[in-house]
Amino acid sequence: MNAALPDVSLTDLAPSLSSLAWVGMQGIDLPIIIAEPGYWRDLHATADVQVDLPAAHVKGIHMSRLYRLLDVLSQGEPLSPAGIHALLQAMIDSHRDCDSRCARLRLNLTLLVRRPALVTQGLSGWKSYPVRLDTSLISGRFRFRAQVTVAYSSTCPCSAALSRQSVEQGFLQAFGQHSQVEPTKVAAWLHRHATLATPHSQRSEAQVAVDINGDDTMLGLQALIDRVEQAVGTPVQTAVKRADEQAFALLNGQNLMFVEDAARRIESALNGYANPSVHVRHKESLHPHDAVAWATPPHEGVPT
């Protein structure tokens, strides 16, 4: 048991002498803690971690070193930019024998937030928000970028206009020959025919990414999510009763938006965030394809 075990990553040369941009692991299961104002929760995350391999002659990096260093995130301290910065530096330091100068870490997780019903007192439910954290330390430059995905409902303005026209024409056909109409008869007609045509709505999603300051003590994920939900105005609901469903229908009817409207609203709401990017997707109920829009600074490229 005390005999030296072979380590070919150290003793063998690479068969083809070339450097590699990134080497590491993907999909590592990890428990982490996310702390937000009024929110402290243990969550399951999956981690992707890599370092660069500039030394062309080195056969391979030390995967176990990265794995053991990554385990520090499961030791009970909330996730923070400072902690991630220190971890990435430790990963680079652990691979000095590979001439590594860069490290990166991606965490995928789901944030659970309890949301109240729109109207019914005491009724609430859990809502999940996919989160991706992309962090890197490249030649001494630290970057921490957070992406959240927010689901909402969108009602098409064009479809709403066409529906209103159909109802208007139906009303004129029913009452166009009358100079006066009793309100009760109008109300009865509307009760039966107001949904003669209805605009189409669809579940939609916004992927929003921002840079997080390395000096921040918290990630501010829920504040970012809240900002997006307030911008779109019709976030999807959790627990509902009939009164809440009616309130949601009213919100949708008064909150018509194209995919372009949603992207612009969210972009405008992100004032104060660093390097924001916005990708919205309306999962059409009219078409078998989706409507999409990006509001992204040119230097940020297109979200994937």
Image (cartoon, helix red, strand yellow):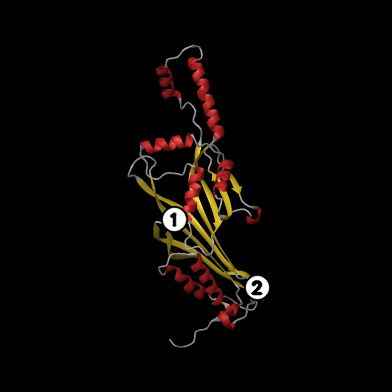
Residue 102 in view in this figure: yes
Q: Residue at x 47, y 49 (%)?
A: 226
Q: Secondary structure at mark 1?
A: strand
Image location of residue 221, percent across then percent down: 48, 56
Q: How many marks?
A: 2
* Residue most extreme to the left: 122
> Which amino acid is tagged 1?
Leu
Left or right for 123, reference 217: left
**Residue farthest to the right?**
17
| Secondary structure beneath label 2 | loop
Q: Which sits in the foreground, 270 or 160?
A: 270
Tell me where residue 215 appears, x and y as whole percent: 52, 64
The amino acid at mark 2 is Ser
Which picture quadrant has residue 71?
A: bottom left
Q: Which mark is residue 19?
A: 2
Residue furthest toward the bottom?
3
Q: Earlier in the sequence, mark 1 or mark 2?
A: 2
Identify which residue, 88 or 9, lies in the foreground: 88
Q: Tell me, yes or no, if residue 24 can be seen here.
A: no
The residue singled out by tag 1 in the image is 111
Give the CA distance from mark 1 to mark 2. 38 Å
Name the residue nearer the viewer: 5 or 181: 181
The residue sitting at 47% across, 37% down in the picture is 252
Q: Splitting the image into 4 quarters, where does residue 192 fall?
A: top left
Q: Quadrant of the C terminus?
A: bottom right
- Residue 209, given in percent of the width and then of the height, sits at 55, 54
Q: At x 41% / y 17%, what residue is drawn?
A: 185
Asked if residue 123 lies left or right of residue 30, the reply is left
**Figure quadrant of the N terminus:** bottom left
Q: Position of residue 259 (x, y in %)?
A: 57, 42
